[in-house]
């Protein structure tokens, strides 16, 4: 990615607060507890007419705790990817051995460094030991209150290269599902790198992790969201915030990959997760992972499993189903091809003349039933611009529309035009209505 900025520092210095301040929303989890941010998180930032990516990373420490080595590895990858590093320190405390550990890693990277001295609200004086870091470009800020963060952004802009900038408005994918279904492993497999921390411990991914995926020379922004648990099990405040982040990522995405563990029974909650995506009108691909672990498979196993899925997910019967194994690298390329197919279907534009031929024939084959004393007649249909395929239908009286006939019209459109993987929005209006 062109023009990427990494936020680096020891735990609990305010990196995630600064990240949220820079992007203008609460993306990273902010919690007064070291080690909350584990993976590296990407978001686009716009400042003074320029767009760039900022990466939030886990705190680098020398303590021997679970995930510490993974967090340090993720931070090092973020540094390698970055064009510029913002080293965040706590200005209220003296420089520690962990700060020196961070600066040692940064100096070996040979990357440009800006020092952000945080927690300096109300023009407080920062600890003089900070000068021992030997960083020329520095600015005292308060990420929490926004003081001098604009000055920091100006400094970032002035230290980035604005020649040959990439288009950052990529088609967005989100990966959602219950914990331990293989979402992070799928992300790593699609990217051919270890972007997300993978562990057998459910709930390892708490933040939403962004990365750029290239398929057939097309760039996609892909988001691995935190595993969605029932709210009754969210005893930890961090898990509650992670759930909200997952829903935010889902809402911002253009296409959702719903990952389901093939070894577990389909549950009502699996359908509810799909329901969340459906509420946001998101195109969906049902990705059945761990298919290699299903024993005694035969030619009918997939068909039988598909029937069970369609029964549970009948409200998204238009969603394609693909059976994969991330571990065995089975059908990963087919999944990539399917992503392209759904994207093309989402962007498909149908000629008005063809639409009207289909609707006229549909009404001749099956006229609308009488409802509330009238029979619905569709006189005209056209596709209008929207995030999902949306059709405006002019009728004699919208009050005579029965939901079953609306479903029939949608099915006729789907039978004649390929909208696999995408929801369809039908808008009915009276002939003289604006």
Image (tube, rainbow, N blue to C red):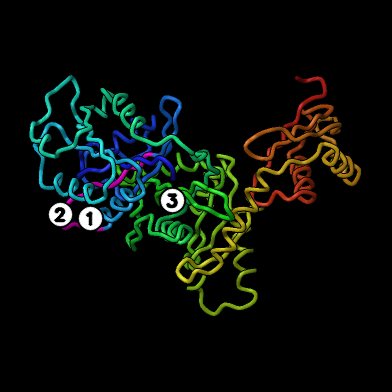
* Farthest-out residue, front: 163
- The residue tagged 3 is 224
66 in magenta? yes
In the rendered image, residue 407, in percent from the top left (x then y), is placed at 74, 44
Secondary structure of the residue carrying tag 1 is: helix
Q: Nearer the viewer, residue 110 or 368?
A: 110
Q: Are marks 1 and 3 in contact (CB under 8 Å)?
A: no
In the rendered image, residue 305, in percent from the top left (x then y), is placed at 59, 67
> Neighbour class for label 3 at 10 Å: few (<14), some, many (≥20)?
many
Secondary structure of the residue carrying tag 3 is: strand
In the rendered image, residue 291, in percent from the top left (x then y), is placed at 52, 69
Q: Residue at x 54, y 45 (%)?
A: 277
Q: Residue at x 37, y 55 (%)?
A: 196
**Residue 68 has which mark?**
1
Q: Nearer the viewer, residue 278 or 314?
A: 278
Indicate the quadrant where residue 428 lies: top right
Q: Nearer the viewer, residue 430 or 225?
A: 225
- The residue tagged 2 is 63
Q: Are marks 1 and 2 in contact (CB under 8 Å)?
A: yes
Q: Which residues are magenta?
A: 54-69
280 sits to left or right of 105:
right
Q: Residue at x 46, y 59 (%)?
A: 186
Indicate the quadrant where residue 386 lies: top right
* Farthest-out residue, right: 364
**Residue 52 has which mark?**
none
């Amino acid at each position: 990615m062109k023009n990427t900025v990494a936020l680096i520092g020891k735990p609990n210095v305010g990196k995630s607060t600064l990240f949220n301040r820079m992007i203008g929303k609460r993306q990273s989890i902010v919690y007064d507890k070291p080690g909350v941010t584990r993976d590296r998180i990407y978001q686009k930032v716009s400042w003074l007419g320029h767009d760039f990516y900022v990466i939030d990373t886990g705190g680098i420490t020398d303590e021997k705790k679970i995930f510490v080595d993974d967090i340090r590895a993720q931070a090092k990858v973020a540094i390698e990817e970055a064009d510029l590093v913002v080293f965040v320190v706590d200005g209220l405390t003296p420089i520690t051995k962990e700060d020196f550990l961070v600066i040692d890693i940064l100096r070996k990277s040979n990357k440009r460094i800006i020092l952000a001295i945080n927690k300096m609200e109300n023009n407080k004086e920062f600890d003089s030991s900070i000068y021992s870091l030997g960083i020329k470009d520095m600015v005292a800020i308060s990420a929490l209150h926004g003081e001098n963060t604009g000055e920091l952004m100006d400094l970032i802009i002035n230290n980035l290269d604005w020649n040959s900038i990439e288009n950052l408005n990529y088609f967005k994918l989100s990966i959602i599902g219950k914990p331990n279904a293989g979402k992070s492993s799928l992300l790593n497999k699609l990217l051919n790198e270890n972007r997300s921390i993978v562990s057998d411990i459910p709930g390892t991914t708490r933040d939403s992790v962004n990365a750029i995926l290239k398929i057939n020379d097309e760039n996609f922004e892909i988001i691995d969201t935190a595993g969605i648990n029932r709210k009754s099990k969210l005893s930890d405040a961090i898990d509650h915030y992670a759930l909200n982040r997952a829903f935010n990522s889902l809402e911002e995405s253009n296409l959702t990959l719903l990952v389901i563990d093939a070894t577990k029974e389909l549950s009502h909650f699996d359908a509810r997760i799909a329901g969340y995506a459906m509420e946001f009108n998101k195109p969906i691909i049902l990705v059945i992972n761990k298919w290699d672990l299903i024993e005694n498979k035969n030619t009918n196993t997939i068909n039988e499993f598909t029937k069970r899925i369609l029964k549970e997910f009948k409200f998204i019967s238009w969603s394609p189903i693909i059976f994969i194994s991330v571990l065995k690298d089975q059908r990963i390329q087919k999944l990539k091809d399917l992503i392209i197919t759904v994207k093309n279907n989402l962007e498909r534009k149908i000629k008005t003349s063809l639409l009207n031929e289909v609707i006229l024939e549909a009404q001749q084959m099956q006229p609308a039933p009488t409802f509330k004393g009238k029979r619905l007649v569709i006189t005209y249909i056209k596709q209008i611009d929207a995030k999902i395929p949306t059709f405006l239908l002019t009728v004699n009286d919208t009050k005579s529309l029965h939901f079953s006939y609306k479903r029939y019209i949608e099915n006729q459109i789907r039978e004649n035009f390929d909208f696999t993987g995408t929801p369809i929005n039908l808008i009915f209006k009276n002939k003289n209505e604006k």
